[in-house]
Image (cartoon, coloured by chain):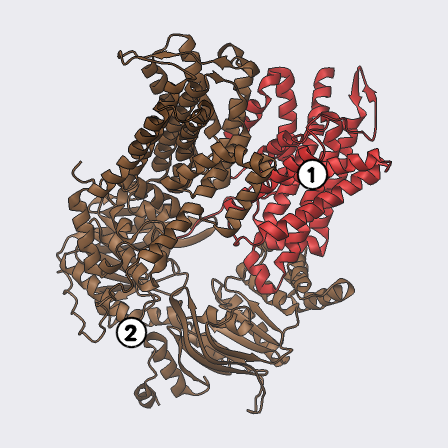
């Protein structure tokens, strides 16, 4: 039971990271129809930059803020230069374009820094004992920070006018255009927000995983599994899907086989999608001729 | 195979021939060993890229699973070679296993969109990577396993790995793979794949099942990827998980996009790129991924179709004979051929519908519709927008999508509803589509040929004859995108006729055509009547429809409301009312003295979407404080006119002049509320869009809330989806008011509302006019618009047929006539007057 609790907490901590990245993916996808494959590698650039700043004496929290700002800025530059010139609705071209950006970003990291694994500093150390088990404080912090961030996103989308406008554009870009709602502005906000969330997730994930140029590729794929599970366009779906994947992934690693965790997670996701193609929270759409 | 043309065989021979030459060069020893090894690898990657490229280009499936199939082939070979498996067993086993997995992925993937297929195939590769790492007894884990020689079970000799022999075999296999692909290119299989990819709905209507096509394509592609894996093991002589990473999947996609998906030459370019990009990057002094990323971005931005298709287009343009003969068919002056007389009343019934009901979610599109069609009869179905006509056609062709169908349909004495859309073609049902959904990546001839499973000389001759009949021979080798809309519609018709249907279904065949094209189409229809084909047509162009129809059934509210001969059906008051609306009482309108200023003026406005004309020569002036009704049947051009008045759509020709500070707001047809947003949020977003923020926004929100009826004001927090149709319409108008417009344009405000709600919506619009707002009403119902507007303009096929003041009764009679035939007949006015 104690071990189960440990696995559950560490699963929720992983899931919180996948949820943050998935939320970033979904926010960008809803506003601009772009599946942003470069999300992970851009966030990794942010991580390396913040580590350099931290090593040169900046406090860790400021370094984290810098990572988030930097990631969002690079993302905006990438969007304006290579994504925006593409025609609207070119789902595949946009996806492949972000793959290209991702290749370049990862390679720049290896060139500027190097491929050697590094330690990434953690805001908190040690563990909290809970019964007989010791739960790492970093896991609890990850869950708490992610929860706060998600609550802020929920507030932004649910309670503010700009959030309503973003949901409106996501629901029908055509109607938004008739009302005169500038979709480019909304798109930029969505990209900045989505990448910022990914950078935050990365910052919480890196102390546990250590830093290599491809540190975020596994979380990215699991975030993908999470958003498909959740329904691709649902923000709640992204969070719940991410958490589900995180918990399953950790349970599989401990109780099934450490070597087959992705097999377990992806098989589960595909099975759910076979039964419910629109995902857990997605909406089925009707087609007309 | 007498059907395969000589040029195809010549083209197919090119690959093996080039391979033979290359092998001959390699055997001379002139190529240094490392270069020869590279050539062998390039051959392996060419086979792999072909498998990914053609799957993407022909079937539209972008697979991330191919590294897994590649690995499957390689491990199969290596494990087999150390366990005494024969060459044949290894090759067939690897290809067979991969094909089975591929068929599964393709079949499942066809149900999903491109993104889901990407996830599905990504999952496959992720799983394969874990299996490679963990199943050490077979794969050797990270260390990998050696590849030994393979003996042939048929006594064809022994194949040694990691030597020159393996390189020759790889080059030879690549040549053969290219040859096979070149043979597949002009085949019906490729055409049907492309058809299913680009328009699944239209593909189903000609009997192509997208699921089966995609399973087959994926299976073949996976088998070739496995073959490439076997070759890789042979050339390298060693197998470890390194080459089969996700990075390979991305590189493969990059190679396809660079070369051009769906082209053989593109696959060769891609294979070469994949092999030599490391060397190129090294000599350029930049890391390979950066080079790859830059190439990818540059190609997508500059040559979105890939290098080879771009060059192909350039060459085609240079080679094209300067003058392609113009179509000599459209001669509208030629007298119209009389339709074949209606079949006798004893003619057998071909189609019978009994109480057919179709529901989409909570919405009923058809409600207990019953009717019948006799063999050889041409039945026209008319009715206002939303009457259920298109749904009826979709029931007949099996394309109802997410809708639920109840009731029974008998076709040729057998129940029809059970049979699948793809089977209905064989039953003799052909159909066209409102927007002529041709397959853009097939030539005109191929669009017709793809209806056949095999392309025999006879089928070719038939297709050519058919193109001649509809007047498309001169463009047989062009792609639809190069043709005007009229020719698209002819092609759509030719495709529907390709297998000589017994029942031909035409979905708005006359819509968007000019007079010459319409005459031509009418002649085609008469020709089909002569063959004894039964025809069901829906359209809004009533004159043309009535000229060919034997019988007309009028629909409203999802069921027939009347029927009769073409000349008489409109005499039925119920049918007339369904178009023109019930006579509302004329309300008190704000007084006008004729000195009001013009707020927006259109001068000679034309508009066309692609080649389809929506508006022609519209002159219109809207004066301050008036209510103007723009009336016309569906498809007359009302919404386009509304968007142009609104200012969000620029007319293709002509001018729109408006006051500099004129604020306009549009309430789109069907309300277009943000259904997931609450009432308040819908209003907020509109204010935000108008640039209003903070306290101003709140003040305006409060003001608009006052305008809403109390039953809406009390529900400001609920999602708009929860409102009734009428409440949604009122909210949509309120949303438009948030920007405080001077001119409000309302598109079909009464659509789908109960009469009481229509009255309420109209009363509110009237009150707005009394407060000084200028209102443009886009209305299907002449009577309703006449009761509510100062001035009415009747739009018929994109032109204003007649305009005047509805207080003048003679005008109303003229307007009613013009509504149906577009003619402003002064004689009618005189009689009525």
**Residue B227 visible in the picture:** yes
Q: Image quadrant of residue B435?
A: bottom left
Element at label 1: helix
Between B371 and A233, the one nearer to me in the picture: A233
Do marks 1 and 2 share a chain? no
Element at label 2: helix
Q: Position of residue B571 (x, y in %)?
A: 29, 74
Which chain corresponds to the colour brown? B
Q: Which chain's residue wears label 1?
A: A
Relative side of B517 to B82, left or right: left
Q: Which chain's residue wears label 2?
A: B
Relative side of A82 to B653, left or right: right
Instruction: Name the quarter where the C terminus of chain B is drawn.
Output: bottom left
> Which residue is denoted by mark 1 in the rendering?
A43
Q: Position of residue A83 (x, y in %)?
A: 58, 50
The mark tally for this picture is 2
Which residue is at 18% across, 42% downward?
Answer: B456
Q: Look at the numbered discs 1 and 2 and tell me whether their residues touch, using CB distance below 8 Å.
A: no
Instruction: Name the quarter where the N terminus of chain B is drawn.
Output: top left
Dot 2 surroundings within 10 Å: few (below 14), some, or many (20 or more)? Answer: few
Dot 1 surroundings within 10 Å: few (below 14), some, or many (20 or more)? Answer: many
Relative side of B757 to A147, left or right: left
Above-or-below relation of B447 to B790: above
Q: Position of residue B357 (x, y in %)?
A: 37, 50
* Mark 1 vs mark 2, CA separation in Å: 71 Å
Which residue is at 31% across, 70% downward?
Answer: B514
Above-or-below relation of B752 to B833: above
Q: Position of residue B607 (x, y in %)?
A: 44, 71
> Which residue is denoted by mark 2 in the rendering?
B571
Marking on residue B752: none
Chain A on-screen colour: red
């Amino acid at each position: 039971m104690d071990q189960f609790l440990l696995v559950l907490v560490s699963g929720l901590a992983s899931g919180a990271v996948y949820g943050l990245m998935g939320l970033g993916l979904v926010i960008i996808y809803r506003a601009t129809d772009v599946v942003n494959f470069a999300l992970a590698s851009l966030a990794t650039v942010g991580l390396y930059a913040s580590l350099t700043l931290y090593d040169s004496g900046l406090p860790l929290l400021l370094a984290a803020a810098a990572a988030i700002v930097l990631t969002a800025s690079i993302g905006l530059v990438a969007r304006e230069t290579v994504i925006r010139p593409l025609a609207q609705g070119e789902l595949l071209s946009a996806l492949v374009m972000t793959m290209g950006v991702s290749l370049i970003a990862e390679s720049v990291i290896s060139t500027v820094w190097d491929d050697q694994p590094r330690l990434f500093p953690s805001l908190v150390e040690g563990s909290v004992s809970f019964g007989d088990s010791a739960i790492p404080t970093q896991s609890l912090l990850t869950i708490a920070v992610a929860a706060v961030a998600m609550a802020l996103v929920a507030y932004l989308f649910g309670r503010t006018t700009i959030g309503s406008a973003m949901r409106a554009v996501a629901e029908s870009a055509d109607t938004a255009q008739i009302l005169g709602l500038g979709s480019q502005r909304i798109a930029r906000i969505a990209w900045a927000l989505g990448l910022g969330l990914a950078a935050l997730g990365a910052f919480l994930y890196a102390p546990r995983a250590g830093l290599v140029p491809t540190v975020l590729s596994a979380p990215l794929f699991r975030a993908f599994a999470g958003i498909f599970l959740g329904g691709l366009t649902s923000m709640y779906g992204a969070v719940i899907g991410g958490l589900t994947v995180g918990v399953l992934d950790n349970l599989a690693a401990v109780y099934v086989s450490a070597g087959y965790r992705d097999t377990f997670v992806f098989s589960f996701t595909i099975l759910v999608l076979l039964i419910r193609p629109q995902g857990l929270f997605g909406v089925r759409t009707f087609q007309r001729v | 195979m007498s059907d395969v043309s000589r040029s195809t065989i010549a083209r197919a021979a090119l690959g093996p021939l080039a391979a033979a030459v290359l092998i001959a060069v390699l055997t001379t020893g002139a190529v240094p060993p490392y270069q020869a090894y590279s050539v062998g690898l390039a051959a392996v990657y060419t086979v792999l890229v072909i498998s990914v490229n053609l799957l993407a280009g022909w079937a539209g499936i972008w697979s991330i699973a191919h590294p897994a199939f590649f690995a499957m082939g390689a491990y199969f070979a290596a494990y087999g070679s150390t366990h005494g498996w024969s060459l044949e067993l290894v090759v067939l086993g690897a290809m067979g296993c991969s094909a089975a997995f591929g068929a599964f992925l393709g079949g499942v993937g066809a149900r999903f969109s491109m993104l889901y297929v990407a996830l599905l195939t990504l999952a496959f590769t992720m799983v394969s990577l874990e299996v490679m790492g963990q199943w050490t007894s077979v794969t050797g884990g990270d260390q990998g396993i050696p590849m030994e020689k393979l003996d042939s079970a048929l006594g064809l000799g022994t194949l040694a790995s990691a030597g020159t022999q393996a390189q020759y075999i790889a080059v030879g296999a690549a040549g053969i793979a290219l040859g096979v692909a070149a043979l597949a290119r002009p085949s019906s299989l490729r055409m049907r794949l492309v058809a299913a990819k680009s328009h699944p709905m239209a593909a189903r209507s000609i009997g192509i099942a997208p699921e089966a096509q995609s399973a087959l394509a994926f299976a073949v592609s996976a088998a070739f990827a496995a073959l490439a894996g076997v070759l890789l093991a042979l050339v390298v002589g060693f197998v470890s998980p390194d080459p089969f990473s996700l990075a390979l999947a991305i590189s493969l996609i990059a190679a396809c996009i660079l070369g051009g998906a769906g082209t053989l030459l593109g696959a060769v370019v891609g294979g070469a790129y994949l092999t030599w990009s490391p060397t190129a990057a090294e000599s350029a002094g930049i890391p390979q991924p950066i080079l790859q990323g830059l190439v990818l971005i540059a190609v997508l931005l500059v040559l979105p179709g890939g290098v080879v298709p771009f060059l192909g287009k350039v060459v085609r343009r240079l080679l094209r004979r300067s003058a392609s003969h113009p179509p000599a068919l459209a001669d509208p002056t030629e007298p119209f051929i009389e339709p074949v007389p209606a079949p006798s009343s004893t003619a057998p019934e071909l189609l019978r519908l009994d109480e057919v009901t179709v529901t989409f979610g909570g919405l009923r599109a058809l409600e207990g519709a019953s009717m019948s069609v006799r063999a050889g009869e041409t039945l026209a179905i008319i009715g206002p927008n939303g009457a259920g006509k298109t749904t009826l056609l979709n029931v007949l062709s099996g394309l109802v999508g997410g809708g639920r169908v109840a009731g029974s349909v008998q076709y040729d004495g057998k129940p029809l509803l059970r049979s699948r859309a793809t089977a209905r073609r064989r039953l003799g049902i052909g159909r066209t589509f409102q927007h002529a959904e041709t397959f853009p990546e097939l030539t005109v001839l191929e669009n017709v040929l793809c209806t056949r499973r095999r392309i025999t000389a006879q089928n070719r001759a038939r297709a050519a004859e058919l193109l001649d009949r509809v007047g498309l021979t001169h463009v047989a080798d062009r792609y639809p995108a190069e043709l005007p809309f009229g020719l698209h519609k002819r092609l759509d018709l030719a495709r529907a006729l390709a297998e000589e249907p017994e029942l031909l279904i035409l979905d708005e065949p006359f819509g968007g055509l000019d007079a010459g094209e319409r005459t031509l189409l009418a002649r085609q229809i008469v020709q089909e009547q002569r063959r004894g084909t039964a025809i069901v047509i829906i359209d809004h162009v009533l004159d043309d429809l009535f000229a060919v129809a034997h019988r007309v059934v009028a629909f409203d509210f999802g069921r027939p409301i009347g029927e009769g001969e073409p000349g008489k059906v409109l005499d039925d008051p119920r049918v007339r009312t369904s178009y023109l609306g019930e006579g509302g009482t004329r309300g008190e309108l704000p007084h006008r003295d004729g000195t009001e200023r013009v707020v927006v003026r259109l001068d000679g406005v034309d508009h066309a979407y692609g080649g389809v004309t929506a508006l022609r020569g519209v002159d219109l002036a809207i004066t301050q404080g008036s209510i103007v009704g723009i009336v016309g049947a569906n498809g007359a051009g009302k919404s386009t006119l509304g968007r142009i008045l609104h200012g969000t759509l620029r007319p293709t020709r002509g001018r729109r002049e408006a006051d500099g500070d004129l604020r306009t707001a549009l309430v789109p047809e069907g309300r277009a509320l943000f259904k997931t947003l609450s009432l308040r949020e819908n209003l907020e977003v509109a204010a935000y869009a108008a640039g209003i923020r903070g306290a101003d926004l709140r003040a305006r929100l409060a003001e608009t809330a006052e305008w809403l009826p109390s039953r809406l004001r009390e529900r400001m927090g609920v999602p708009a989806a929860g409102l009734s149709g009428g409440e949604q319409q009122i909210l949509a108008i309120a949303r438009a008011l948030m920007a405080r417009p001077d001119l409000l344009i309302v598109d079909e405000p009464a659509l789908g509302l109960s009469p009481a709600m229509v009255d309420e919506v109209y009363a509110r619009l009237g009150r707005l006019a009394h407060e000084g707002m200028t209102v443009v009403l886009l209305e299907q119902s002449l009577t309703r618009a006449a009761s509510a507007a100062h001035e009415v303009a009747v739009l018929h096929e994109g032109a204003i047929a007649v305009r005047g003041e509805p207080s003048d009764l003679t005008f109303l009679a003229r307007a009613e006539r013009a509504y149906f035939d577009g003619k402003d007949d002064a004689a009618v006015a005189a009689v009525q007057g």
